[in-house]
Amino acid sequence: MEIQQDRKELGLILFSRIISWIFTPYYIPFLAFAILFNFTYLSLMPLQYKLIVLGVIFSFTILIPTLTIYIFGKINNYTLIELNHRQKRFITLILVSISYVFCLIMLYKMRTPWYLNSIMQASLLGLIIITITNFKWRISEHMFGMGAIIAGIIIFNILFDYYTIWWLCLAIFVGGIVGSARIILGFHTLGEVLSGLLLGLFCALLMLNPTIDILIMKYF
């Protein structure tokens, strides 16, 4: 019985690790752009332009953050578990935030539509808040990403007049699985998972607003 119980626990931990890896929050901006470029009127844009934008997003939200965090860990001989400690996590969050800032600057120079810029604005705002609160409250980045996805589906449903209730239900279901996985792995408490979800909802609903983009363009 004990052996079976241990196998179940190991299987649950392995499943949770796989879920955490698949739904890494840094992939979300790239996936959001890819979906919009393929399933909205943005699909009419020139292929070369779309590939350039996706290349910029991939480079600054996935490739560069992954490489910098990997190099930072190797230089200091940190394991993945050690990189999740508060002080090390603070540095990795700073590195990712800097990369996101440059990504947003590139998008503005490329004159991408405001709602595409808003995806990066919401991501950057969330990262800044998570970084600031890191030493007191380890808000879940994974759940921030899921909250942003849920809010994004709602907003883009309004913008593009699509019926996305099943996508919304799927996102909520997956969010529950991701949150459970993070708790099972011991990376976050229930409160940190819920706060990540709420932060993602807040940032996406705030930034995916044309008025906010106008203010940003006016003053920055």
Image (spheres, grey):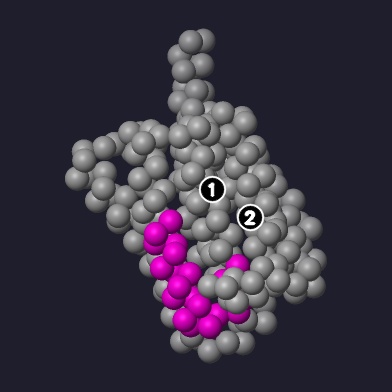
**Marks 2,1: beta carbons within 8 A:** yes
Q: Which residues are magenta?
A: 97-118
Q: Is residue 8 above or below residue 204?
A: above
Callout 2 amino acid = Cys
Element type at mark 2: helix
Q: Residues within 10 Å of mark 1 (few under 14, many from 20)?
A: few
Q: Is residue 115 magenta-colored?
A: yes
* Left/right of residue 205 with respect to residue 9 in the rendered view: right
Give how far across and how far down residue 186 sits, in percent: 49, 28
Give how far across and how far down residue 163 sits, in percent: 80, 66
| Residue at (57% x, 73% y) in the render | 219
Residue projecting furthest to the bottom: 46
Q: CA distance from mark 2 to mark 1?
A: 10 Å
Q: Is residue 13 visible?
A: yes
Give how far across and how far down residue 207 sits, in percent: 65, 63
Q: Residues within 10 Å of mark 2 (few under 14, many from 20)?
A: many
| Residue at (53% x, 73% y) in the render | 220
Residue projecting furthest to the top: 1
Q: Is residue 157 magenta-colored?
A: no
Q: Is residue 14 above or below residue 125?
A: above
Q: Is residue 151 above or below residue 142?
A: below
| Residue at (44% x, 64% y) in the render | 101
Q: Which residue is mark 2?
A: 203
Residue 176 image-quadrant placement: top right
* Left/right of residue 152 with respect to residue 143 in the rendered view: right
- Magenta: main secondary structure: helix
Q: Is residue 154 above or below residue 201?
A: below
Callout 1 amino acid = Ile
Give how far across and how far down residue 217 sits, in percent: 58, 76
Q: Is residue 36 visible?
A: no
Residue 129 marker: 1
